[in-house]
Image (tube, rainbow, N blue to C red):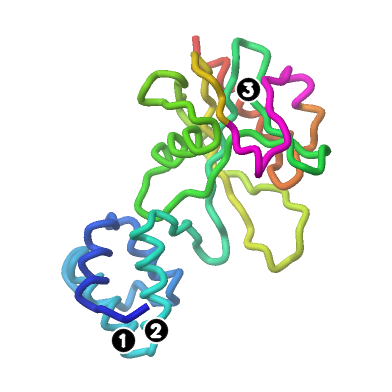
Amino acid sequence: MVFDRVAIHKGLTEKLRLEDVPIVCSMLGVDHENLSGDGKIGILREIVSWAERHAKQQEISSLYQQLMENKLEKQVDGVSYNVFVPIFLGNYRVLMFSLHDHESFEPVNAAIHVGETEKQAASRAIFEETGLSVEARQVQLFQPLPDYFEVAQHSNESTPKIKAKVFPARYWRGDVNWDKEKYWSHGFIQIDTALRVNSQGTGGLELIKQASLSYQEQKG
């Protein structure tokens, strides 16, 4: 990709919030504290100039392209940030997807993208994974659990750590259109059953347990 400082600065300014700037700095290896510039526009102009001075044109161009395509996943200091959205049906069942190894299950989840809020990421995850819409009132999204939790992973050490924000949700209506290439099957599973499933790569036990308690409190 050709380095275009004007287009990159314009795109970063339009897509990023001020609170996203330190995240972009971390991803590029820029010391955010030492940047000059007045406000978001000035700081982003300085970041583009820094990339040019330090021969990081390819890195910032790639970051810009991913941001424009809404594919730039939030990572800070080697940690990837996700949302997990267990969707409950009534008081006792939760939507879970079966992976192709037939031994692992996971709820709706997605990486948080730079430039979006956690709630926006949760709504997007629901639509991408199920075809259901919060805006169309097919799913009701509740307040998230207060803290991020570290997701248990079963992979090599080079894989970035994952921390997730959990948003309990309630199913209202509509057909679940799930990704048949990514998942083997899906279903609303009894919570007690889900609690016995150690969801590989999702930390599912703690996820379902915490979200279930929060959901019961909030839905009343």
Q: Separation of disc 2 and disc 1 at Cα?
A: 6 Å
Specify the segment rendered in magenta. Answer: 178-194
Q: Please say if the residues under marks 1 and 3 sit with CB atoms less than 8 Å apart.
A: no
Quadrant housing the N terminus: bottom left
Type of the residue with mark 1:
Glu
Type of the residue with mark 2:
Lys
Does residue 101 appear left or right of residue 32 in this picture? right
Q: Which residue is mark 1?
A: 52
The percent coordinates of residue 55 (x first, y second) are 38, 89
- 25 lies above or below 203: below
What residue is at 53 percent from the left and 18 percent from the top? 171
Q: Please say if the residues under marks 2 and 1 sit with CB atoms less than 8 Å apart.
A: yes
Which numbered tag is attached to residue 56?
2
| Mark 2 / mark 3, whichever is N-terminal | 2
What residue is at 24 percent from the left and 78 percent from the top? 5
Q: Separation of disc 1 and disc 3 at Cα?
A: 49 Å
Q: Separation of disc 2 and disc 3 at Cα?
A: 46 Å
Which numbered tag is attached to residue 14?
none
- 55 lies above or below 14: below
Q: Residues within 10 Å of mark 2 (few under 14, many from 20)?
A: some
The percent coordinates of residue 151 (x first, y second) are 66, 47
What residue is at 58 percent from the left and 50 percent from the top? 163
Identify the image quadrant of residue 39: bottom left
Q: Which residue is mark 3?
A: 212
